[in-house]
Amino acid sequence: MNQVRTFRLAIAVVVGVVSATSTAGAQSATKKPAAAAADGQKVFTTTCVVCHQLDGAGKEGLYPPLAGSEWVQGDENKLIRIIVGGLSGPVEVAGETFNSAMPGWGPVLEDKDIAAVATYIRSSWGNKAGPITESKVKSIRAAMSSRKTPWTITELSAVKDT
């Protein structure tokens, strides 16, 4: 009798684990855009906010705004390269030139985090650009895997993506 009870308990545990795993998998596979934006906001507030500020306005004369930025709303490939590899030297944003350095977050952040934060900044503070996928980040990261220095605007302008 104890063996039957143990067997039933084992089946109940396995069914419960499989059910919970299936539910969790379904939830992550169908993650709502709002949830992805929340993930991006979390990454932003832990890595980007010091320079770019909560409102995306940057710091005058030091760090460029993300709100209304042509770099944020423009070519997603260049934006991903900037986030992964960093940016050094002058950059013009909204008619103002900034000459500072942004660290590359590639060594610190996973592809899903970079996709989330890129999507967040492209859809916040009045920005209206589309989402960035994890697979897109992965392919850009692979394409620049041998790069060891931050990008310059001149280098980014020369990159031709297919």
Image: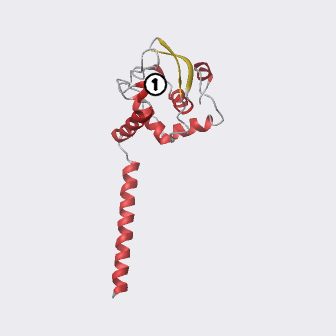
Residue at horizontal 39 percent and vertical 34 percent from the top: 45
Disc 1: which residue: 72
| Towards the viewer: 33 or 10 | 10
Residue at horizontal 38 percent and vertical 53 percent from the top: 26
Relative horizontal placement of residue 12, taking residue 131 as reference (left or right):
left
Mark 1 residue crowding within 10 angstroms, few (<14) / some (14–19) / many (20+): many
Label 1 element class: helix
Task: For the N terminus, give its image quadrant.
Answer: bottom left
Amino acid bearing label 1: Val
- Residue sitting at the far top: 95
Vertical relation: 71 (above or below) 120 = above
Residue 158 is situated, as x and y percent measured from the top left of the image, at: 62, 21
Residue 17 is situated, as x and y percent measured from the top left of the image, at: 38, 65
Relative horizontal placement of residue 106, taking residue 147 as reference (left or right):
left
| Towards the viewer: 84 or 119 | 84
| Towards the viewer: 162 or 64 | 64
Relative horizontal placement of residue 58, taking residue 148 as reference (left or right):
left
| Towards the viewer: 89 or 125 | 89
Residue 105 is situated, as x and y percent measured from the top left of the image, at: 52, 34
Residue at horizontal 46 percent and vertical 25 percent from the top: 72
